[in-house]
Image (spheres, grey):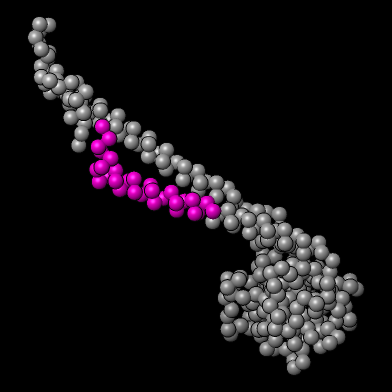
Amino acid sequence: MYRFLLSRQWVILTLVGLLMMPTMVRLGFWQLHRHERRVANNHLISDNLKAAPLPVESLTGPGTVVPKKDIYRTVTATGRYDTAHEVVARQRTAADGDSIGYHVITPLVMADGRAVLVNRGWIAAGGNLTKFPKVPAAPSGEVTVTGRLRPDETTGATGIRNKGGLPDRMIMLINSGLVAKDLPAGEEPVGGYMELSATSPKPTGHQPELIPEPDHSSIGMHMGYAIQWWLFTAMVPVGWVILVRRERKERLAAAQAAQAAAAGPGEGPDGDSAGGPADGESPGQAVAAVAAP
């Protein structure tokens, strides 16, 4: 009764199912690993935000790549803002997630001559995107700033494409290596930059909107997607069995209908039925013979 499984249609269907199962299992583990990385990253960010502040120069230096273990680490720096070489990063979103404007990037020159780029916050774009915008003045004199250490932005990490021919003092990527080209001799920036969270003494007047802390509580839907892929994997053999049983049932019904149609009207009670099985053949053998492909 199951000879139909050797037909081309059923062989192809079975092979497709066998190929789909390991693929979906691997997709499930891929989502599981993404979930685990997200959870580990959230723990790292949370621990770094709660850690005691460290001097920025103890974690990074000129030409240094900020390691992943130090991302969002709370750091401090003391120095004077170099507002003459202040730049703005274009196409940045405000805390509301909708408004587009600039991030204000101001070098803070420390006592040893090294500088750290400080992201002072967000400002609105204004009407003219071809001119340097009006930026709230940075505090004058010596200040101590506290913020979150961030690695230099790259196109590969952020998806932001670095463009040439931008208006004066405008950048696309917040990158110490790129900004260093326009700084005066001797003012060498350390790797990475700071997202400002506090300034001492506290500045007066209007200031850029501070960048909010990163969301380190959401874990996304990766675990749910992993479970879905594994459920789909389990559904393949279950669905295959259901289809096989349905096919067998339909073939049996078709065979019985064909046998009844071939039998015609029955004979008298003393005679053999015209629709009965042939001599020496059982009713089951007759149905099987008709159902077989």
> In the rendered image of this protein, does residue 169 appear above or below residue 245?
below
User: Residue 172 sits in which quadrant?
Assistant: bottom right
Specify start and end residues of the magenta stretch as a single range.
1-29
Q: Position of residue 244 (x, y in %)?
A: 33, 36
User: Residue 287 sits in which quadrant?
Assistant: top left
Q: Is residue 25 covered in magenta? A: yes
Q: Position of residue 58 (x, y in %)?
A: 80, 77
Task: Specify the principal SS of the magenta part.
Answer: helix
Q: In which quadrant will I find the C terminus?
A: top left
Residue farthest along the bottom direction in this orientation = 185
Residue farthest along the right direction in this orientation = 201
Q: Viewer-proximal residue, 79 or 289?
A: 289
Q: Position of residue 31 (x, y in %)?
A: 56, 54
Q: Position of residue 132 (x, y in %)?
A: 69, 81
Q: Which residue is painted at 44% across and 51% down in the image?
A: 22
Q: Which residue is painted at 12% across and 14% down in the image?
A: 273
Q: Is residue 128 covered in magenta? A: no
> In the rendered image of this protein, does residue 21 appear above or below residue 134?
above
Residue 267 seen in the figure: yes
Q: Which residue is painted at 81% across and 61% down in the image?
A: 50
> In the rendered image of this protein, does residue 263 appear above or below residue 8?
above
User: Residue 141 sits in which quadrant?
Assistant: bottom right
